[in-house]
Amino acid sequence: MSSDPWGRVDETGTVYVRTADGEQVVGSWQAGSPDEALAYFERKYEGLVVEIGLLERRVKTTDLSAKDAQIAIDHIREQVDAHHAVGDLDALKVRLDKLVETVEARREERKAQRAKQSDEARHSKEALVTEAEELAQSDQWRAAGERLRALVDTWKGLPRLDRKSDDELWHRFSHARSAFSKRRKAHFASLDAQREEARKTKEKLVAEAESLSASTDWGPTAARYRELMADWKAAGRAQREHEDDLWNRFRGAQDVFFAARSSVFAERDAEQTENLKLKEELAEEAEKLVPVQDLKAARAAFRSINERWEAIGHVPRDARPKVEGRMHTVERALQESEETEWRRTNPEARARAEGLTGQLQAAVDKLQGQIETARSSGNNARADKLQKELDGRQALLEQALKGLQEFGG
């Protein structure tokens, strides 16, 4: 018979291990000497020691889940309880019990951490909803629209809450975005209506200007043209595609009339010579407006100059192209600056681009919600199908956003 502090082998080859509950049968050994039997089962004990040590390190240094850790503990405990090793099995049980306590502590710690993260996510989403509802009342269409899109990106980066809370907050968030989009659409629809009204008014002004172009009632007709010009400026801008054509017709009708009047008044050379001097001074004053620094101030100054110009009357025919050419050069510079500003702030095209972007963004958001619902319900086939559709919508959204950037929004 052979023995050591934790086990022995009797004369029949039966191996025993000593525990706090007394000796327990480990197994039967017939393949060699008793010392070999003890050595074999001691190695099995050392294997359990190593396995427990590795599990302890995993629990302390990795993100091993409590569930997986408990499964591993139970697996080792089954081997310890089966007494198929020779060594201090009671010490292993103590280590396993402590490890269970550690796992439970980690479980509670992670539970508290998840609760904290959920609470933080709730506060963050509530803040996003509050800001979105405030932005929904804004008239800063571009800035508010950009901020709402940024809020959507922030929302996507936050963890989900419980379904009921998350859905309620998302409903408020989505409603605020929809309310803003409706107000913005109504605003630009109103602008379109105003431009259409301006177009109709200018059509009438052009028709009257053209009907007066052959008049020889010089004084009253010239006065009426000045009134028509004031009405033209008061009418506001029509749609861009109509504005230039209407203006060319309106100005052309005036030019025909004033050219005829100038021909009749050719004998008034002295007066016209003085007019030339005055217009040259105005042209010099106008030329100081170029290059344009402050468009609004330059337009106001040019209107003042132009009104004084119109009040002066005509100049000698041979001098007219040069002096008017100087004014036209300034006018073209102002028009180019105005066109640049118009292109940059074109609300009609920008409204269409923003409307399309809003529709695409809403579609993307809806698909993302449907994908999450499908995933959570285990319907991966539907989720994959929806993902393909989402990829296509996101590509269109990116293109629409690039187009929107051209309008500075």
Image: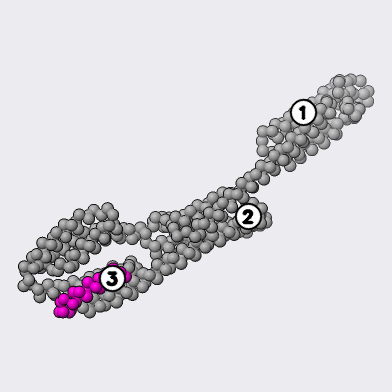
**Mark sitting earlier along the chain (3/2):** 2
State if disc 1 and disc 3 touch (CB < 8 Å): no
State the image coordinates of residue 249 (x, y, percent, origin top left). Answer: 24, 72
- Looking at the rendered image, the disc whose residue lies closer to the viewer, 3 or 2, is 3
**Mark sitting earlier along the chain (3/1):** 1
Which residue is nearer to you in this view: 354 or 394?
354
Q: Is residue 232 magenta?
A: yes
Q: Quadrant of residue 258?
A: bottom left
State the image coordinates of residue 5 (x, y, percent, origin top left). Answer: 86, 20
Q: Amino acid at mark 3?
A: Trp
Residue bearing mark 2: 166
**Mark sitting earlier along the chain (1/2):** 1
The image shows a total of numbered marks equal to 3
- Rendered position, 281 above or below 247: above
Few, some or many residues within 10 Å of mark 3 (<14, 14–19, 20+)? many
State if disc 2 and disc 3 touch (CB < 8 Å): no
Left or right, 155 with reference to 18? left
